[in-house]
Amino acid sequence: MSEPRVVVLGGGLSGAAAAYALARAGLTDVTVVESSATLGGLAGSFERDGHFYPLGYHHILHRDRALLFFLERIGALSQVRWRRIRMLFHLGGRAYDLGSIGGFARFPMRATDKVKFVRLMLRTFAKQDWTEWEGRSAAELVDSWAGPGVRTALFERLTRLKFDLPCDQVSGAWLGARLHFREGSAPLGYIPHANWTKVLCDGVTRLLEEAGVRIRTRARVRGLETQSDRVVCAELESGERIEGDLFVSSIPTETYLRLISADETAHLASIRYTALLSVICATRQSVQPDAYWTNLASLDRTAGAIFLLSSLNPTIGRPGDTCVNFVTHLPGREHPLFAAPDDQLSELYLKDFRSVFGFDLDPFWTQVSRVPMYSPVFSRSFRNAPIQSTSWPNVYFAGNYRTFPSIVSTGTALGSGVAAAGALLQNHGRSSDLPEAVSGFRLRSMPRA
């Protein structure tokens, strides 16, 4: 095969990164097929009155090397500013800042358990490789490193908010990696006077265009045609056929298996996804306390968390606007709340806001987003799918269902695409310096806001 035709299924960040890596390595026949109008997937945006907003909360992590690499590549990293944020836990009618001495002292947990909690955080921060915790539960991790009191007071609430699962059904490897990243205590990045995810998606799209990648948007795949042990064609709903010699699937595993149900690659069929409800609104009201991230840990509210996007990025939207994001993680799109009418959702979230902040929110616009397949459920038995199909060897996989146990982020999506492209190239006698460049990237400075 002198010059293979490569078809990338899905134009989210993992698919876009795979296409870029392949084209950068010299492949000249690469096509991205995306059902939406633009590339970016979950990092997409919407527009209101000339300003762009994310579909849901996004922030830049200072150790997210793939994301930082691509921001540098598109010329945007120098624009990023860093800010320490406040993360609160709203429990029993009160908000606690565990990042402050006073807030941690007041949090309803025994003094001995607080000492054990600090020890847990120090141990997880020091540990980078969590593979030994695969197949073991978050309950085992917290109980053995801190104790059942810490688990009951805090972590049982957090795993319910994230997956609607108790700690004994959630992966210990995932929780350990999540704590290692210190997402709530390290500075987070944003781009002033912009929605940084739009900057990223526009920049990555430009990289693909400059590299000669063909981008097919508004193109929904109806099925995949096979011959012998190979996938040979993606058939669109329009009836058009896009033939290929090699394929990269960056779409959710559930969607992929609907297109080609005979793929028996290990772990693909067992992956389940959470659904996400994200409601963003803008108000001219000032909101206090000015905390970016408030977890509703009482578990008695519709929202799992309330984000003040303008607390991280004070320049988002119009000057003086406060941008509020209500978020609910659901165990699946079959949950009745996922189909609730917009006005009903808004009413429920406004009630949550009143209970947390003590006054009525008065938004002048509201945007409701529903994501039916948001994040893999990292259960105790979760395993990454192989990077290459064992049923159809010319198919490679990219996506956050392959980055376990790391946190799920824009950066891990980008990194998974680079990894899939690297495996494809290696198997066909090509090479790429991109995986090494991404893994070795370091942030040189962190300009503060």
Image: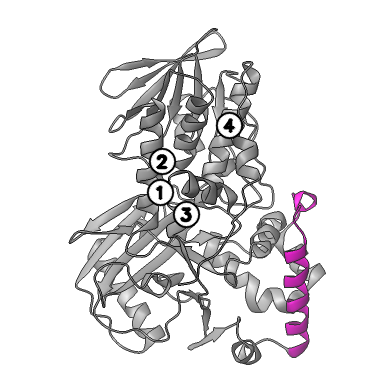
Q: What percent of the width, then of the height, locates residue 264?
A: 60, 26
Considering the numbered disc 4 on the image, is that residue within a helix, a strand or a loop? helix
**Marks 1/4: CA distance?**
20 Å
Q: What percent of the width, then of the height, locates residue 141?
A: 76, 64
54 to 214, vertically: above or below: below
Marks 2/1 in contact by CB < 8 Å: the verdict is yes
Marks 1/4 in contact by CB < 8 Å: the verdict is no
Mark 4 surroundings: few (<14), some (14-19) or many (≥20) residues within 10 A: many
The disc at residue 204 is: 2
Sequence-first disc among 2 and 3: 3
Considering the numbered disc 3 on the image, is that residue within a helix, a strand or a loop? helix
Q: Which residue is mark 4?
A: 420
Sequence-first disc among 4 and 2: 2
Sequence-first disc among 1 and 4: 1
Q: What percent of the width, then of the height, locates residue 283?
A: 25, 76
Q: Which residue is mark 1?
A: 200
Judged left or right of residue 117, residue 271 is: left
Callout in the foreground (2, 3): 3
**Marks 2/1: CA distance?**
6 Å
* Residue in front for this viewpoint, 230 or 5: 5
Tell me the magenta residue range: 111-136
Residue at (25, 74) in percent of width and height: 319
Marks 3/1 in contact by CB < 8 Å: the verdict is no
The disc at residue 77 is: 3
**Marks 3/1: CA distance?**
10 Å
Three-letter amino acid code at disc 2? Answer: Val
Quarter holding residue 170: bottom right
